[in-house]
Amino acid sequence: MKGFELIYNNQIVTASIERGVISIILSKIDDAIRVDFVGLDSNTNQHLTWFKSTVNESDKIAIKVIDVNQVAEVIEFKPNSRDSFENKLIEYKGLKKYLEKEGLIKKEE
């Protein structure tokens, strides 16, 4: 299966997902620079983290597209909050209001 290999200094991390999204993100907030190797598994609806670190000035980072035989251990799992009950209720209320405004459903009294 196609995936990615992140080489951070001398550390190698590989990841692939059968169905979902993988991202390698470099971010800078103020003077702090970070690298995050993350994904969203659509089969389990979970956010996955394989690697995260603060980046220093002399660090070396390389990314390769590879055929992945072995995936690195996931260091963090988080459920996709988009599917939480509270978010579904907010989405429902917004859609209901829109449909009432468009006259597609009757407004409840």
Image: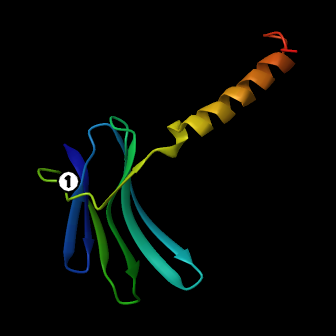
Question: Around disc 1, counting alpha carbons within 10 Å, would you say few (fewer than 14), some (14 to 19), or many (20 or more)?
Answer: some
Relative vertical location of residue 99 with respect to residue 49 in this rendering, above or below: above
Which of 96 and 18 lies nearest the eye of the viewer? 96
In front here: 63 or 71?
71
Query: Which secondary structure, mark 1?
Result: strand
Residue 103 horizontal side relative to residue 71, left or right: right
Residue 19 against residue 92 in the figure, above or below:
below
Q: Position of residue 69 (x, y in %)?
A: 11, 50
Instruction: Point out the residue furthest to the left here.
Output: 69
Name the residue located 48 percent from the left edge and 79 percent from the top edge.
33
Q: Quadrant of the N terminus?
A: top left
- Quarter of the C terminus within the rendering: top right
Residue 10 in picture, x, y percent from top left: 19, 79
Q: How many marks?
A: 1
Q: Residue at x 79, y 10 (%)?
A: 104
Q: In x, y percent, where is residue 65?
A: 25, 55
Give the side of residue 57 with respect to residue 19, left or right.
right
Amino acid type shown at disc 1: Ile
| Residue at the disc numbered 1 | 66
Residue at (72% x, 25% y) in the render:
95
| Depth check, front residue: 92 or 27 | 92
Q: How is the image coloured?
A: rainbow
Residue 102 place in picture, x, y as percent = 84, 16
106 horizontally vs 39: left or right: right
